[in-house]
Amino acid sequence: MKILYLGDDWVGSNARSLADGFRQAGHEVVALDSTPVTLPARGSAPWVYSKLAHRRAPWRVEALHAEIDRAAAEFRPDLLFVFKGVHLDQRRLLDVPARWHVHYSPDDVANPENISPAYLAHETGWDLVVTTKRHNVPELRARGAQQVLFVRSAYDPAWHQRTARRGTREYLAGFIGVCRPDRRDQLVDLARHYGDRMIVRGPGWRRIPELRTTGATIAGPVYGQQYSTVVASITANLVLLNSGNRDTHTCRTFEVPAAGGLFVGERTDEHAELLRDTVECFLFDEPAELHGILDWCATHPDKAAAVAEAGYQRITGDGHRYVDRAREILGALPRGAS
């Protein structure tokens, strides 16, 4: 199959990993980068415009559509696959000559932050809408989507792999991810308790003054193979969910174990389906339960490592790579679409 793929193509992005998954599944893929529209450089004219107008810069959108049209005319794809293209001209996307038009969203499509009026007006035009949120399936169907597919998130073996530590520093607990209001108090509390035995990495955390006084290591984001390198330095890797997405699992659900890290995450039905609590991971409901897990890890490092190994074997052995998700998606394509 010939797939024209549109998504953010920066190193470490899930969109890039899924594009590679389609290629690994044996298909010819031409990937176009949507980053100039979705994530304009901070301080640039498109960034300023997006902040003032609350929409993406129209000249950047037009330039990307012109690139899509040129590629479609030359490549003549069987499938146009769009990874969260809600800020683009939906009619132009659906008019791209291809047998199938598929839209994929990694975020909760009931959250206004993850959709747009233009997308909603054309959602029913997509041959297949793919979501990583199980609760979105009935909601999308109620909105009139032609066909809906739930797939879980995944990990990329090119980046998420067991690796040697870089340096001798080891941390008892760590979190790698974006600073969000629903995570802030919990991580400040943990950092105050565990001090220099804890590391927090990701966008926004260095702007939290309460964290800077705890002794914990606070640093910026890491992507790609750097992510696995940081995981290797942490005994207990926290998997915290995004309440804005109503998450019941996340990319970290797969990335942490695939990188050889011990998964310590919020207790949900999906997490319990994927990994056995106390055998392949540790799940918690309340802060006191989490503190108990971390204290146990501190006094039983060898047993904690055995749980991490069991989690690694489970996740890497159960078909959770992006190539596996690509095959699931292609297997769900409606036969009569045109």
Image (spheres, helix red, strand yellow):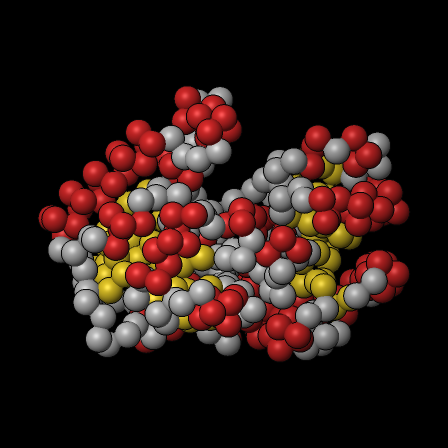
Q: Residue 294, relative to residue 89: is it above or below?
A: below
Residue at figure coordinates x 70%, y 62% from the top left: 265
Rendered location of residue 110, percent (x, y): 54, 58
Residue visible at 26% across and 34% down?
63
- Residue at image x 72%, y 49%? 182
Q: Position of residue 105 (x, y in %)?
A: 45, 57
Q: Is residue 333 above or below residue 201?
A: below
Q: Quadrant of the N terminus?
A: bottom left
Residue 28, image x, y percentages: 21, 59
Q: Quadrant of residue 206?
A: top right
Position of 203 with respect to 302 (left or right) is left
Residue 220 place in picture, x, y as percent: 62, 36
Q: Nearer the viewer, residue 113 or 295?
A: 113
Who's the residue at 25% across and 41% down the image?
65
- Residue 94 or 170: which is nearer the viewer? 94
* Residue 22 visible in this rendered orientation of the protein: no
Count the marks: how many?
0
Q: Considering only vertical position in the picture, is 61 above or below 183?
A: above
| Left or right: residue 118 compared with residue 93 | right
Rendered-image quadrant of the C terminus: bottom left
Residue 159 in sight in this render? yes
